[in-house]
Image (cartoon, rainbow, N blue to C red):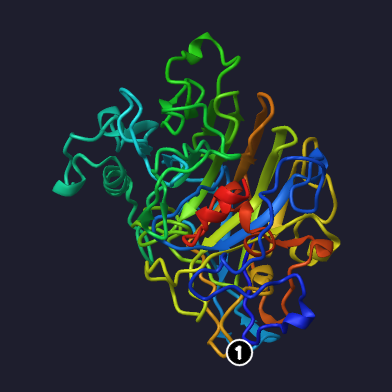
Amino acid sequence: MDFGRCDTPVPASNCPTLIKPNSTQPNNQMSPKPFPSPGPPSPLFPRLASQRLFGRASRSPKSRVCPCCSEIAVSACDIFVSCPAKLARNVMPSVEIVGKESISAVGDPEMRRDGLRVAFEAWNFCNEVGKEAPGMGSPRAADCFDLSNDSQNHKVTEADNKLGVGKAFPGLSPKSLNNSDLYAVEKELYLGSLCEVADTPKPWHFWMVMLKNGNYDTKSGLCPENGKMVPPFNPGRFPCYGDGCMNQPLLYHQQTSISGNGTMRGGFNGTYELGSDISDGINGISYFEVLWEKKVGVGSWVFSHKLKTSKLYPWLMLYLRADATKGFSGGYHYDTRGMLKTLPESPNFKVRVTLDVKKGGGPKSQFYLIDMGSCWKNNGAPCDGDVLTDAQELVQLLPHPIWNEYGYPTKQGDGWVGDARTWELDVGGLSSRLYFYQDPGSPPARRIWTSLDMGTEIFVSDKDEVAEWTLMSSFPLHLTGGARVLPKPFIPSPERGIVNLSREHPKIISRLPYSPIGADLDKLRNHS
């Protein structure tokens, strides 16, 4: 996770590993370092399965980026935001007064609503569509229904899910009709309108399953740099088997149905190998699967996830997101639809989720216990889409005893394979203490989070790897009243399990779900 507020930046002498970024190109002032290659264990990317749960957050731009992605899958989770009687925004350490009441920030608290709302999105390496897969339509889909007397009223048809470039739908602008990237943006808004649930303080839409292909054809010139297209360059370490490696997947949808015993089941699955047939098995090909199940009127939805890499697709990511219901969500440059009817703000929110990791995904897998995204400028102002001033930082937290106070993993193996548990994460409190650069003298940025997700990223696997995990029922979480005294910020330190990816490892950007708008492709070329 990567957050932090510090009105008074820590002097460089007190933080020798932190390099002050340029205000307009935060990654370009780093001393050159080679692009880290998969290899022996390191504090940043552990190679032992018992080290695989991470926390991460990012302040990221909303405009078009170079490498990008993020998120995982979800089951029953809930985010509760306290109602503060007073919120102090002075220099840290600060006192936060937390009210006695709490409300859920998500539209479907604890995922108990029988009428499910879930959607699917897929991205290429540039956070765009590029080219639709044959016969699949635009890579956006949804499964939304209401339940009455054990009868389902589906809001989205398969014809809606198969909509692709050249096919009109209500509200589609003429400029987007034949543009695959813009078409997907507007298709998400259209699906959101079909799934929308009226609520207070605002309507909400769906949980979002996000899938991303990490292949990048550097000779294609497809990914922009600072909002502008760049010429082709040598591949380096970016995976790509040749023309077409950045394709969208074959997507199959099992619309949610009810069995005779009252169990509801549905799911999305598919593969990136366009000529394959998953009914023949998945040996030698990539595969993704998200299945959901719930008994009518009982408990919460259980989401089960599976992600498999292949020789042609060694870098894949799968997440379940809770995004803002309107406006820009973390890392995106367009209007999205989602589940967060109330945007959580640090330090006044917590997350409770039950996670069961079945298979870890091999030595290159990184599972984010929670990943958060927001966007603000170095001067503390909210991002506005200006690629020259919308900065990004990425901070990753590894298991360490220092996180015990906030409910996060404290040692290797916590919550990993064979250790299913319910996590009560004080995300708001911790996010208030993580250091984020701001210009000296600038007012502290409000830490308002427009995206939260969980899931895994299998980075350039050496062989076919499989990750499997389940998110299941969570329980109500109530915040008690009283003052919260937040000590000084945590400073990035590998010894403490805190790594500032964008500063200490500027070339690591291509390994992360979110990528900085100021991604320095020249350095990626020269040091790959």
Residue 230, x across and y down, in percent:
40, 50
Task: Determine the residue positioned at 67% across, 27% down.
Answer: 465
Query: Does residue 264 appear left or right of residue 464 in this picture?
Result: left
> Where residue 343 sits in the image (x, y, percent)?
47, 66
Helix, strand or loop at mark 1? loop
4 displayed left or right of 47: left
Which residue occupies the foreground of this view, 442 or 159? 442
- Residue occupying the point 57% across, 65% down: 27
Visible residue check, residue 119: yes
Query: Viewer-proximal residue, 9 or 528?
Result: 528
Give the side of residue 135 with respect to residue 417, left or right: left
For badge 1, the amino acid type reads: Asn
The single residue placed furthest to the top in the displayed view is 280
525 vs 207, left or right, is right
- Image location of residue 527, percent across then percent down: 63, 50
Residue 28, position as x, y percentages in the image? 56, 66
Q: Residue 479: name its quadrant.
A: bottom right
Quarter of the image where the N terminus is located: bottom right
Q: Is residue 37 above or below residue 401?
A: above
As drawn, 416 above or below 60? above
Q: Nearer the viewer, residue 110 or 142?
A: 142
Name above or below for residue 191 compared with residue 449: above
Q: Quadrant of the C terminus?
A: top right
Instruction: Name the residue located 66 percent from the left edge and 83 percent from the top edge.
Output: 9
Dot 1, crowdedness within 10 Å: few (<14), some or many (≥20)?
few
**Label 1: which residue?**
90
- Which residue lies at the image location 30% right of the left edge and 23% below the top edge? 135
